[in-house]
Image: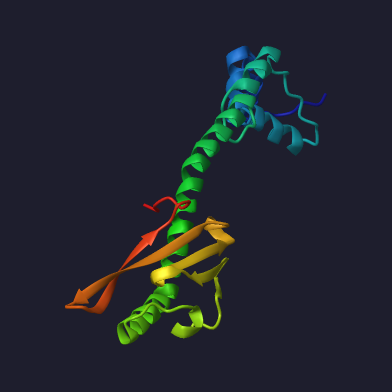
Amino acid sequence: MSFSLVYPAERTRFAYADQRHDVCGFWASLHELLGDYPWTCKRVHAIQSLALGHEPAQPARNPFAYVLAFFAPRIPGAGAAGLIIMFAVVGVLLAVAVPAYQVYVARAEIATFLVATEADKQAVDDYAIQTQHWPLDLGEIGITDAQRTLGQMDTSVTLGEEGVLRYTFEGGSFDGKHLMFVPEPQFEGERVSGFRWHCRSTDIAAVK
């Protein structure tokens, strides 16, 4: 005669593992699917079976739980509704972040442009104050290269009547658009003593 001795603690573990048959209903199965991990009693059974060299045999989940779990929002889990919600959140964030980033880039480009063109306005100031005449071309105010590269943006400048500086953008946020600096003479008596510059454009909206 042969027999095996099962200690109370082991008996308790086996009894706990047997509870896996009680968690195969709809709600228990749904909870397991949404949690993305098996019930503890199933895990205990798996450990005991593997320790004894057996393949764990788990009861099947309720098939209707799979249907609802497919639409349940959970991350991770890849439920259809979960993916929809995730994409909706990402879409909202992009809808807010992308325009804000574009405004930031536009501001940075305009700031770089204003700093780079300050010397052009100063050149017009110096020439007109010294000669009391408007310059006729860029060469008269010392601008030998009308093309400039400012980061991702290129600009070209032309000199119009009455000292107007007209810039054309290529690349960047203002590709193909134009901007003008228009000088307003300031007088001391009959002589021009300085200029107040105005920035104007017909196709660039104010960057706020």
In the picture, the quarter occupied by the N terminus is: top right
User: Which residue is painted at 35% across and 80% down in the image?
Assistant: 133
28 or 181, nearer to the observer: 181
Q: How is the image coloured?
A: rainbow
Residue 9: quadrant of the picture: top right
Using the image, determine if residue 63 lies above or below residue 145: above
Q: Position of residue 184 (x, y in %)?
A: 30, 68
Residue 142 seen in the current view: no
User: Which residue is painted at 48% across and 46% down in the image?
Assistant: 99
Q: Position of residue 94 (x, y in %)?
A: 52, 42
Q: Position of residue 56 (x, y in %)?
A: 76, 29
In the figure, is residue 13 to the left or right of 207? right
User: Which residue is painted at 57% across and 57% down in the image?
Assistant: 175
Residue 82 seen in the current view: yes
In the figure, is residue 95 to the left or right of 183? right
Using the image, determine if residue 99 lies above or below residue 185: above
Q: Position of residue 50 (x, y in %)?
A: 75, 36
Q: Residue furthest right?
A: 1
Q: Residue furthest front?
A: 190
